[in-house]
Amino acid sequence: MIYAIGTLLTWLGWFAAFRTVQLGLQMALGSNGPSDGKLTRNLGISAVVAAVGLAIGATLPSLLEKRPAGVVIPLVWFVMPYSAWLGVLCLVYGLVRLVQGFFAINEEERTDRLKAAGIWGIGLAIFGTLYKMDPDSKIEILKGGIPFSINAAASIILGLVAAMAIMIWAGRTAKNRGLSKTIVTQIALIAGSIVFGLPFAYLVITSFKEDRDMSSPNGIVWVPRVQETHPYMDPKNPLFELQENGQTVRGVVTQREANDVVKVDVQSPMAIRGTTIETQFSKLKEVPRDAPIYTAKLDGTDVTGFAIEALEDGGVKLQLTAPANLKGKEVQFGPEDIEPVRHIGLRTENYTEALSYLPPETNNGLVYVKNTLILVVLSVVGTILSSSIVAYAFSRMKFPGRDLLFAILLSTMMLPGAVTLLPQFLIFRRLGWIDTLYPIWVPAFFASAFNVFLLRQFFKGIPMELEDAAKIDGCSYFRAFWSIMLPQIKPALAVIAIWTFMAAWNNFMQPLIYINSPENMPLSYALQLFQGDRSGEPGLLMAFATLTILPVLGVFFFAQKYFIEGVTLSGLGGR
């Protein structure tokens, strides 16, 4: 406990020491701040607290079993069960409320503070009882310290002092204060961008990694490397290429029959790998394999070669390419004797392989993109048209029961989606829309309550004189809505369009319920199925995920100004 109390006082002393330096620099540089008398008094108090705290901290390392060399900043931690921690929390808050009650300015406030202290006291009694009832409960105090060499401690202290001096100097004038504020703001924004951009950077980098870089004992691999390969015409098991159903297929011949007919075991694309194609041998074209290159030691000599055969024990047979006197020689090596030759680069094959795993009827994922674009375009158009028309009617047209109907519309926002899920499914099944895109985009043409409410508020903010002038010129309600009112709320419509676009692009629940066949799936559903099939191959999964989010990123970068306009719009924006 002495060490724990001393540690607290030491940290308080360090804080007071830096506070003393700050006040001293303010006096030396003549910074705008408190009066000289108040500044001197604060400086003296901070100096006394710093001297006491640091003096206590200087003696604490002697209580350690093994004192590190140099400057030691003491640390302490209490190891105790949750009941004890909660009891301590109740004790602290109870004492705070007692002190507040003692300094209360009136009797009512004092009574409230004492009642709160009593409640915390009850909590202390409860958690204290729970602590006592557990026979295994005990409290341990861990003590230690952070060692610094004299040079490191001096560098840190001088750096902090220099930073405080620069900040005080920058704050001396209004102009410099504005500059320093701008610099700090920009640094904070850059730091935030880096922190929040790390997951996306990890996604993109992982999509270009080889499998061996997915996990490393040295942590995350941020610089991808790729295996060097050598083209090799395998005489024992040649690789052939042919065109089948409009796509390029590669495989090996497993059986040759009469009349030049052969059976080809497909190796790529991955979606049909393992299947057998029967064709004419004359239609086949022999192509080289990409043989990986390795280095090894042969009789104490460093050699380099490419793999021409994989052995059952995990080793390989290499055809040597270096040194020159051993070129062309074939040698077998065990798995522990070889090292892959790699260079910094991107494995772009992850993207082509990820697409090759998709079913052939999806045309390398273009069917998914087509379905997603259909849903996005129709959802955006339907949402904007229906919501703006309904909002205009509720804001500008007068008809019996308008306010009641608007209240009923808003009340639908309180209905959870799970409540309407089954009725909607039964309706769409009765219409014969299951396994089609209709249940996903048709509801967009029936205005949503939130969008109606949002646009109604924008419409109500537009002066009536604009619409009255249009009516005097002979405009109908629809003409006034289309030519006068809609252009005034373009930023609001853009924001709704962006929200709807992102929601439709990422919509997963509705396709999961209504879609069964691959040719009707959108990208979000296809990504989930791809994750289930290839979850053990992070590179392919990240590549497919990157492809699915690229359009969303493009929309964000080109339309981010509408987000800002939608937030700052006051009444007649969008002009």
Image (cartoon, rainbow, N blue to C red):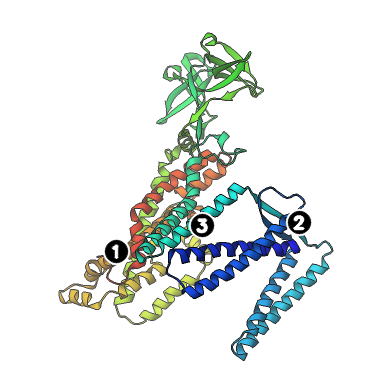
Question: Mark 3 vs mark 2: which is more N-terminal?
Answer: 2
Q: Residues within 10 Å of mark 2 (few under 14, many from 20)?
A: few
**Image quarter of residue 485:** bottom left
Foreground tag (2 vs 1): 2
Q: Secondary structure at mark 1?
A: helix
Image: 157 above or below 129: above
Q: Which amino acid does the dot numbered 1 rest on? A: Lys
Q: Tell me the crowding category of disc 1: few under 14, some 14 to 19, or many 20 or more residues within 10 angstroms, Cα based.
A: some
Q: Position of residue 523 (x, y in %)?
A: 45, 47
Q: CA distance from mark 2 to mark 1?
A: 71 Å
Nearest to viewer (mark 3 / mark 1): 3
Question: Amino acid type of disc 3?
Answer: Val
Residue closest to the far top: 325
Q: x and y percent of residue 382 in the render?
A: 35, 61
Q: Are marks 3 and 2 in contact (CB under 8 Å)?
A: no
Q: Nearer the viewer, residue 138 or 155?
A: 155
Residue carrying label 2: 63
Q: Position of residue 330 (x, y in %)?
A: 57, 12
- Residue at 47 percent across and 35 percent down: it is 356
Q: Secondary structure at mark 2?
A: helix
